[in-house]
């Protein structure tokens, strides 16, 4: 079954817009990766400054290939003057899960 990776990002309020714009500007970089199944950027609604970046992959090998290729290249890009922009998140943790059960809506 699929694997899910959730990147837990602590984002100060003044950096939220920056984070969301950065994800929007790279919106399609993951979609063509072999083994990619799903992406969601989840904005906190209340009581936390934690964003969740949800991705689902066919298997661990697909995720690792993306991490070592397209993701690494996207995060090494330089900003103006060739300098890499400062991270919008102040902390990051990666959670990993295997999908053991799943369901979708029933047809009408």
Image: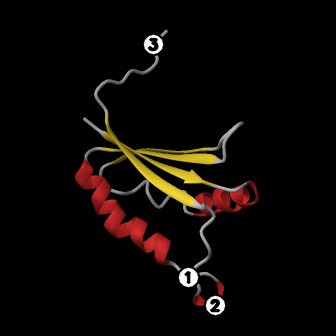
Q: Position of residue 29 (x, y in %)?
A: 47, 61
Marks 1 and 2 in Cβ contact (< 8 Å): yes
Q: Residue furthest bottom?
A: 81
Residue under the point 39% across and 21% down: 103
Q: Nearer the viewer, residue 59 or 13?
A: 13
Give the secondary structure at mark 1: loop
Label at residue 78: 1
Relative placement, left or right, of 46 versus 97 is right
Which residue shows up at 76% across the image and 59% down it? 14
Percent coordinates x, y for residue 95 in the rendering:
40, 46
Helix, strand or loop for disc 3 = loop
103 left or right of 86? left
Residue 62 horizontal/vertical position (percent): 27, 54
Label 2 residue SS = helix
**Residue drawn at (31%, 32%), measured in percent from left and top?**
99
Q: What is the total number of numbered labels drawn onto the structure image?
A: 3
102 above or below 15? Answer: above
- Neighbor class of circle 3 (other Cα within 10 Å; few <14, some 14-19, many 20+) is few
Q: Dot 2, crowdedness within 10 Å: few (<14), some or many (≥20)?
A: few
Q: Nearer the viewer, mark 2 or mark 3?
A: 2
What separation in Å lies between label 1 and label 2 (alpha carbons)?
Answer: 8 Å
| Disc assigned to residue 105 | none
Q: Earlier in the sequence, mark 2 or mark 3?
A: 2
Quote the CA–CA distance across marks 1 and 3.
47 Å
Marks 1 and 3, the one that precedes in the sequence = 1
Which label is found at residue 107? 3
Residue 56: where, in percent of width, then height? 38, 43
Q: Residue at x 25, y 46 (%)?
A: 59
Tell me the tag on residue 81.
2
């Amino acid at each position: 079954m699929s694997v899910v990776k959730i990147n837990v990002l602590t984002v100060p309020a003044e950096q939220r817009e920056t984070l969301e714009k950065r994800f929007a500007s790279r919106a399609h970089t993951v979609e063509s990766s072999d083994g990619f199944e799903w992406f969601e950027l989840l904005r906190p609604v209340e009581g936390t400054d934690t964003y969740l970046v949800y991705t689902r992959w066919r298997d661990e090998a697909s995720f690792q290939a993306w991490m070592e290729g397209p993701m690494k290249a996207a995060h090494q890009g330089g900003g103006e003057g060739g300098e890499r922009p400062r991270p919008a998140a102040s902390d990051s943790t990666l959670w990993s899960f295997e999908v053991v059960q799943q369901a979708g809506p029933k047809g009408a």
